[in-house]
Amino acid sequence: MKKFLVAVLVIAMVSMMGLVALAYDVAPNGDKWVESATLNDDGSVTFALSESEFVGSHGAGGYRFAVFDAKPNVVVEGDEGFWVHFNGTGAIYYLDSANGASQTAPADKFEQGKTYWVTVVGLDAAGVWRWSDKPFSFVYGAQGGSDEPTTTADVSTIAFAVASVLGCGALAVRKKR
């Protein structure tokens, strides 16, 4: 009976970790939402957003736009990762009511050679907020930005899963002795 209970508890813990990532709708094509970052003559940066992948679909009802000088939390316990993006928590530049296929951030927000991350959270036509777990990154002063998604592994969730499995394994070994 105890083995069955331990097995059920392990399955329940692993299942709960999977539910955390599904708290809000994460779009599968989020790495295509911000297409580029262009350095303007006055030092400001214009970000081009994809009309087909974001503005016309996931951001049809408007969107929130944030630029961070440190990589923002993506997936953490609960739905905190969503709220960091949604509220622009810690952002150096944030718009809570944006629309259109481009946004321009002023030059005084950036330092030459530093890496920045851009996130957008869109309100689709059905009134559902959609976000991406793949922030766009670019280096200020370099033309074009990066179209490659940044790494988004959440070490704390992985560590929790490993500790849970090892803990249950230790209980099973202890019972056999």
Image (spheres, rainbow, N blue to C red):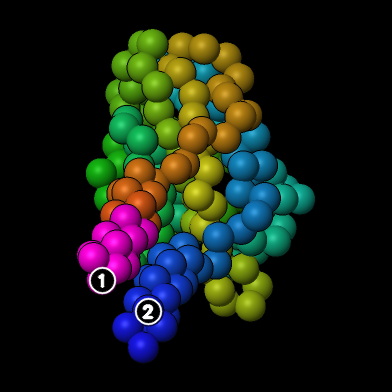
Counting from the top left corner in percent of width and height, residue 37 is at 56, 27
Q: Residue at 65% x, 55% y: name it.
A: 28
Q: Any magenta on residue 166?
A: yes
What kind of secondary structure does the magenta stretch mostly adopt? helix
Q: Is residue 79 left or right of residue 152?
A: left
Q: Is residue 87 visible?
A: no
Counting from the top left corner in percent of width and height, residue 98 is at 50, 54
Circles 1 and 2: CB atoms closer than 8 Å: yes
The amino acid type found where label 2 is placed reads Lys
Residue labelled with disc 2: 3
Q: Nearer the viewer, residue 140 or 152?
A: 152
Q: Is residue 8 visible?
A: yes
Location of residue 86 by image quarter: bottom left
Q: Measure how far apart labels 1 and 2 are at the Cα level.
A: 9 Å
Counting from the top left corner in percent of width and height, residue 14 is at 43, 67
Mark number, residue 66: none
Q: Is residue 111 left or right of residue 46?
A: left
Q: Residue at 65% x, 73% y: name it.
A: 125
The amino acid type found where label 1 is placed reads Lys
Location of residue 122 by image quarter: bottom right
Q: Residue at 26% x, 71% y: name it.
A: 175
Helix, strand or loop under label 1: helix
Looking at the image, is mark 1 or mark 2 nearer the viewer? 1
Residue labelled with disc 1: 175
Q: Bounds of the magenta span?
A: 165-177
Identify whether 118 is placed above or below 110: below
